Amino acid sequence: MSESNEELVKRIAKLVKQNKELKEEITRLNNLYLKLQDENDNLKKILSKFQQPTNLASEIEDQKTMRFQMATVLFANIHGFSRISDQINSQKVIDQLDSIMFHFDNIVQKYKIEKIKTIGDTLMCAGGIPQKNITNPVEVVLSALEMIQIVDEIQHQSENGKIWEIKMGIHTGPVTVNMGGNKKNTFEIKGDTVNIATRLESSGVPGNIIISANTYELVKEFFTCEYMGKMPIKYHGDIDIYLVKGIKPELSVNEQGRIPNELFRTRFGLLQFNDLQEIILDRLEKELPPYLYYHNVKHTVDVITEVELIGWGEGVSDEEILLLKTAALFHDSGHIISYDNHEYFGTVLAREYLPKFNYTNEQIEIICELIMATKLPPKPKNLLEKIMCDADLDYLGRSDFIPVSNTLYRELKEQNKIGSLNDWNKLQLKFISGHQYFTQTALSLREVNKQKQIERIIQLIEPEPKNL
């Protein structure tokens, strides 16, 4: 071994020691900072009782601090400097570590997770910030599995053999986020969630992912996990911890459980649908015209519920349920743009949003066809369109048909699209008498009651006055 290489190894060893000392000092200072921050927050609360903020700086400071009730923090640490020997090319080792960290950055971006900070061989990132979502625990565990795979692949290709090992701790809970930066937002997170994730990593097993019970409950449908026992956490007592073994066999394309298959993506899509639904329903709540007494948020939620009910009754697949629910979510969203031809405008909004939630082009086309199938009169071409049409007109066979029908009359009346209530009842009688449910599930659930509604409408219609 050359003299220059020996010097390099000695320098690395020295740096490792210094790095360890610095990390211990950082931990001590961080704990002190958190304590002082808490005291500062308490003082601010007390002060706010006596005076209001008097300058713009105070208001801006408040705006940059946000509280997230469900974020998932990943704390990862790469170990390996202790395995460097005289026979190993030191520069290649450093390059290898740089390559690993580069891939980690790409993985974090792939799963839309925020990298909080990187210090040497330590990485901290968080899912669920700054955009709230319900999927962040699954995305963070997926990213952790992919990080382990990258470390294994890079070392498998290396002539130096296995040097690096990675320890990971993951916990889900509330965090406080301080946002800063002018051109690009930077994030600083604090709270017990961060401390617990750090504690899980420090007590973890190299090459494995340790998660808390909080995270386990949110990801157990997707991953095989092994109970490891309890871990003492300051101020929290003993908490249950789990070892992530990999993606469940039926949801993975390989035996190692590292790569999700189509069934995984579908079930993840069904989970992610909750985030999409919240966004669209919130927009409908804010932007739908006030005269939409029938085509409102309640109707959209009703149709989402019914497509799932009828879909399961007709035995469709998980993916088809996802497509039906998504189409139901958007089928009346076009009313934001126009009352007439709203089905088409619903497809426009669907094409705008769905690529952001990883729907494929093929799925988007099917969803748009399902939306257009609700255009009256219904003419479904396949089972999914039949389910969609039956769900959209489910109210025709419900016991609340008359009051629901009256909301549609009121909606049309305010737009001068209909005459008297008696004219409306005649129109409804003609429509419902000619209507048919297309699926066996809807026929069994609604057809009998629909016939009763026809009898009720007949009783409501006033006879035409006789000419004298």
Image (cartoon, grey):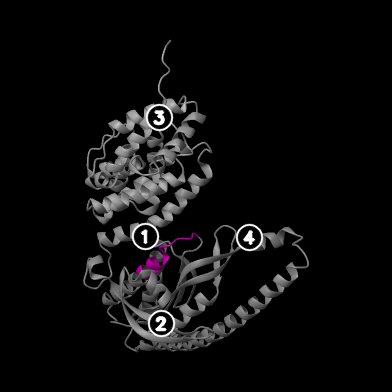
Q: Residue shown at 48%/68% (left/top)?
A: 71
Q: Which mark is residue 271?
A: 1
Q: Residue shown at 37%/44% (left/top)?
A: 399
The residues tagged by marks 4 and 1 sit, at their Cα atoms, a distance apart of 30 Å
Q: Which residue is mark 3?
A: 425
Looking at numbered disc 3 in the image, what kind of residue is underneath it? Asn
**Start and end of the magenta stretch?**
131-142
Decide which of 216, 81 is in the foreground and name it: 216
Question: Of marks 3 and 2, which one's residue comes earlier in the chain?
Answer: 2
Q: Quadrant of residue 101?
A: bottom left
Looking at numbered disc 1 in the image, what kind of residue is underneath it? Leu
Looking at numbered disc 4 in the image, what kind of residue is underneath it? Gln
Q: Secondary structure at mark 3?
A: helix
Residue 124 picture location, percent across and down = 47, 73
Quadrant into which the N terminus falls: bottom left
Q: Is residue 437 above or below residue 99?
A: above
Neighbourhood count class around disc 3 (C-alpha, 10 Å): few under 14, some 14–19, many 20 upward:
many
